[in-house]
Amino acid sequence: MHENYIITNVNGIAMDDADTRFSALAVENGRITLVGSADDVAPLIRDGHPVLSLDGKTMLPGFMDTHQHLGLTGQVLNGLNFLGDDSLDTVYARLTEAAKEAPDDRWVLGYSLNEYNVREGRLPLKEDLDAACPNRPVMVVHTSWHLCALNSRALEILDLPRGLPGLDVGADGMPTGLVRDPGSLTHVFPAVSSLTPAEAKLASFRAACEAALRQGITTLHCLEGGEFGPGDTRLVVENRDKLPLNTVIWNQVMDIEETVNLGLKRIGGCICADGAIDARTAAVFEPYLDQPDNRGTLNFSQQQMDDFILAAHKAGLQTAIHCETDRAIEQVLLAMERAIAAHPRKDHRHRIEHCEIPTPGQLDRMAEAGIIASMQPAFFPFLVDMDDYELRFGKDRLRWIHPYRTMLDKGIVMCGGSDCPITPHTPLVGIQAAVLHPIKEERLTPLEAIRMFTSDAAYSGFEEHERGSIEPGKVADLVVLDDDPTTVAPEKIGSIHVDRVIVAGRTVER
């Protein structure tokens, strides 16, 4: 498309502070220069600017996914995705077939397997994987990415230390093949990632970006490096200009010097204070009701977390920490409060990632401290079984799962993400999930939910002056939809077709 052009006949939703609606806009050299009506752009049309009529389609700011992983998403795109499989026999057959087609030294990798999706109701053990692939190393990753299954060849190559936390052993004292966190994070995933060539990783980064563009996403917060992919942050930083959309890069390590040397202003992401609800390693004050001796796992001491947050805060970095449930939220919230009190900095914009089951008191403190809640509404349709969760937590605790309305009413800024590959890059599905929250008191309006993936998402990355709304002077990152998510029936929001995606003024081929 020409660098200077006019868009007309559009149902435009600016997502600015005034909730502006518009029918035409002008774009010059990748930025928005005018937002208004057909009469407003008429002089530009008379001057010969090219015109694109959108036939009444709906335009929004390009969506932002504020919590996803290029490296992990690329792995899933290059491996086997078991999300839709309903039996372990199907899983084994696909592993066997993949082993026949791959080079002799290649690992066979599968992802997004959940025991609740298969009729057997369990994950495979090493003997099952050995039968499917006797001569190849195999790793099958749980949907949560906090649990994996390995065959004997993979266990032999990885040579995991006996007594590794998270390494399941049977009655015979031998590994079963299942490894939970922290061992899956500290030993398994880094080792497997290190076996992937840089060229393959770069190709997978681009594939992940292209998958996001197809869903109307023009900005990705890339949470890279650390235990999930050592060295991946540098690889993304050095190649970000080759990626087809805007990136906001987080370094998932506790190495502040490395982060500053990379020229980054933010640190963290899936630095995991606790584990995952699905793996029953999310850290809770009260035990899981179906496992009375289990209160999950805190991966750091309070002192370790205090020291890290304080050092990052003093260095001027924005921080983000993975906390799924109340005990982990308490550890990180306390560390952030202490750092802010010791070195006041009004506009820190520190984030708590996931924040799935906080306490009401914790929400009050997050609002007071100006801490952002980085949420993933699509967890509901893809991961959360409310009946099963009630068995784990009981009704009283489950009342506070993803408390969007309460957060918003208390003044907490929420940004939206997918945690891809945990759930797909599908912002419209996330918006629908927030509007149709299973707890009615926590539902958002469509506009409020859209803000999580546009204007408030931009704020969460210090990009609100450049992106997140359709206003003169901002980058022309735009998405065009076949229907209006603010007026369709809520249950239809997630299936709205993405008609066109514009990045910095240029229509992207998808």
Image (cartoon, grey):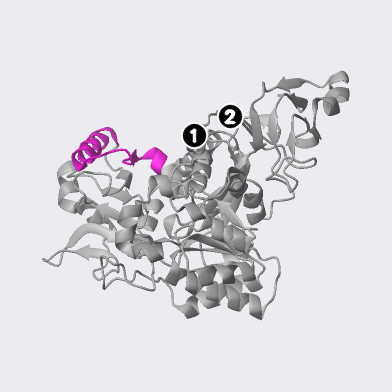
Q: Amino acid at mark 1?
A: Lys
- Please say if 491 is above or below 330: above
Question: Which residue in the structure is indicated by mark 2?
Answer: 483
Dividing the picture into quadrants, the one containing residue 392 is bottom left
Dividing the picture into quadrants, the one containing residue 156 is bottom left
Percent coordinates x, y for residue 310 in the rendering: 59, 75
Residues 436 and 220: in front is 436
Q: Main secondary structure of the magenta part?
A: helix
Query: Taking the image as drawn, is residue 53 in sight?
Result: yes
Q: Which mark is residue 492?
A: 1
SS for callout 1:
helix
Location of the N terminus by quadrant is: top right
Q: Tell me which numbered mark, 1 or 2, is placed earlier along the sequence.
A: 2
In the image, taking residue 366 as reference, residue 193 lies left or right, namely: left
Percent coordinates x, y for residue 325 in the rendering: 43, 65
Determine whether label 1 and label 2 are within 8 Å by CB: yes
Location of the C terminus by quadrant is: top right
- Please say if 371 is above or below 26: below
SS for callout 2:
loop
Residue in view at x 47 percent, y 40 percent: 204
Residues 448 and 227: in front is 448
